[in-house]
Amino acid sequence: MLHGKGHAQDCCCRRIRGFGRRMTAARHAVLDALSARGEHLTAEEVFKAARRLYPNLGLATVYRTLELLTRIGLVSKFDTGDDRARYEFADPAGTKGHHHHLVCTSCRKIVDYKDFIKEETELLRRTEEGLAKKYGFRINSHIIQFYGLCKDCAG
Amino acid sequence: MLHGKGHAQDCCCRRIRGFGRRMTAARHAVLDALSARGEHLTAEEVFKAARRLYPNLGLATVYRTLELLTRIGLVSKFDTGDDRARYEFADPAGTKGHHHHLVCTSCRKIVDYKDFIKEETELLRRTEEGLAKKYGFRINSHIIQFYGLCKDCAG
DNA sequence: GTATAATTGAGAACAGTTCTCAATAATATG
DNA sequence: CATATTATTGAGAACTGTTCTCAATTATAC
């Protein structure tokens, strides 16, 4: 049985256990991969990275773990227009700070930006409130993405 | 050969021709379906609606047409977290006005909202400018979506 | 330690989307 | 208007990302 190294891992363990689920080597490997490899990873990328830490790992387990982490709220899953899902730590755990995405529709490069986040967050909060009231939703996440061509692709 | 009925269709024809592509009965049917059936349709939904107008239509053609329309900029394609793409007229053609989406993660209901749009648009414009400058992107679209539970699903 | 139930890896199955290809139909040309 | 050219089509096969199945394994409670 492996032991998580970082604070994030410990925190995640507790969260997983608190959810009545077990802590396993496979899940450790996925968590390690997610925190080592950074943002917006595909399941395949997580799989490759995690398998280096735990060679016996299966792809289905990666999907299952990512789904679990997403359900718990530790990971956020999103889409950037190609046809595979992306995963990254949700704010609190990842501690890389809240950010949004800027996506090149040609080369698929993804830029995480934090500039403008403060204003955006402020507006989003107000909008959320208004929408919740008007449409009776209990809102718990949002997505903002900009699409365009990066410098290299714009030519 | 069918003839489009609405202004949007005429406009689209011109755009398609202007792109060096041909105007066909299948494409008319897809355009009609898109404008009759409203927002955020899946390819399957477009297919079913369009096939009522042109029974010989094939699903692959619907995908090809939607891809063409998206590439031309007449249609916007997006994703709301389930695993099928959604399509709707982009602003100018659809003339239903710019809107964003509020998505129920349980029943998958999608609400188009236009409230708050003005402030959002204003902020997005400024953010876009800033991002374009800082990261050298030529930005040409964005997505804002809120996720949560609708009144019925929140219980 | 043992019992119990969650978790696993492997591969099959699945769903949405794209591809292939011969047949058809829209446009340009004469 | 007839014809040649070339895009487009429908049907189904193929593909890709993701989920499911199931017997074997392993974390946890006692």
Image (cartoon, coloured by chain):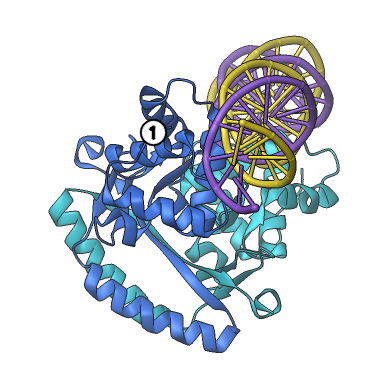
Chain colours: A blue, B cyan, C yellow, D purple
Question: In this rendering, does residue B75 appear at all?
Answer: no
Please name whichever residue, B57 or B145, is drawn nearer the observer in this view of the structure: B145
Locate residue C15: give its quadrant.
top right
Locate residue B107: give its quadrant.
bottom right
Residue B57 percent location from the top left of the image: 79, 39
Point 42% across, 56% down: residue: A14
From the viewer's perspective, is residue B31 above or below residue B20?
below
Quarter of the image with the C terminus of chain A is top left
Task: Describe the element under mark 1 as helix, strand or loop.
Answer: loop
Q: Chain of mark 1?
A: A
Residue A131 percent location from the top left of the image: 50, 82
From the viewer's perspective, is residue B79 above or below residue B109?
above
Quarter of the image with the N terminus of chain A is top left
Say how many tags the image has. 1
Residue B110 percent location from the top left of the image: 62, 68
For label 1, the residue is: A2
Locate residue C2: give its quadrant.
top right
- Residue type at numbered disc 1: Leu
Q: Is residue C29 left or right of residue A141?
A: right
